[in-house]
Image: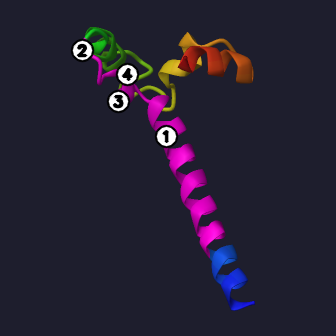
Amino acid sequence: MRGRSILAGALIVLLIVVVGATVWGIRYTNSPDFCDSCHIIQPYVAAWNKSFMGSKLGDRNVQCVDCHFEPGALGYGHGQL
């Protein structure tokens, strides 16, 4: 019985780690910081930083995917590929 409790606890911890890593990964890959990691896109990220969407006066919650991905889960999945 004790072995099952330990296994169940380990599975719960593993599930929490996997879900947390997945959420962090999705949020990070939607951010301009991730897009800026590619040298080809750096001029566009610099332009975004100077724009209303990226400036301190604008709405910093506008992410790359808000404009460059089709809406919905399928559009998001296609954009990530």
| Cα separation between marks 4 and 2 | 9 Å
Type of amino acid under label 4: Cys
Q: Is residue 39 visible?
A: yes
Residue 60's quadrant in the figure?
top left
Q: Alpha-carbon distance for marks 2 and 1?
A: 20 Å
Q: Which residue is mark 2?
A: 39
**Mark closest to the chain's N terminus, 4 or 1:** 1
Q: Nearer the viewer, mark 1 or mark 3?
A: 1
Residue 56 lies in what quarter of the image?
top left
Residue 28: x and y in percent read 45, 36
Residue picked out by circle 3: 33
Q: CA distance from mark 4 to mark 1?
A: 13 Å
Look at the numbered discs 4 and 3 and tell me whether their residues touch, using CB distance below 8 Å.
yes
By secondary structure, the bulk of the magenta-drawn segment is best described as helix
Check if mark 4's residue and mark 2's residue have beta carbons within 8 Å. no
Q: Which mark is residue 25?
A: 1
Along the viewing direction, whichever of 11 and 70 lies nearer the viewer = 11
Q: Secondary structure at mark 1?
A: helix
Identity of the amino acid at label 2?
His
Q: Which residues are magenta?
A: 10-39
Q: Which residue is mark 4?
A: 35
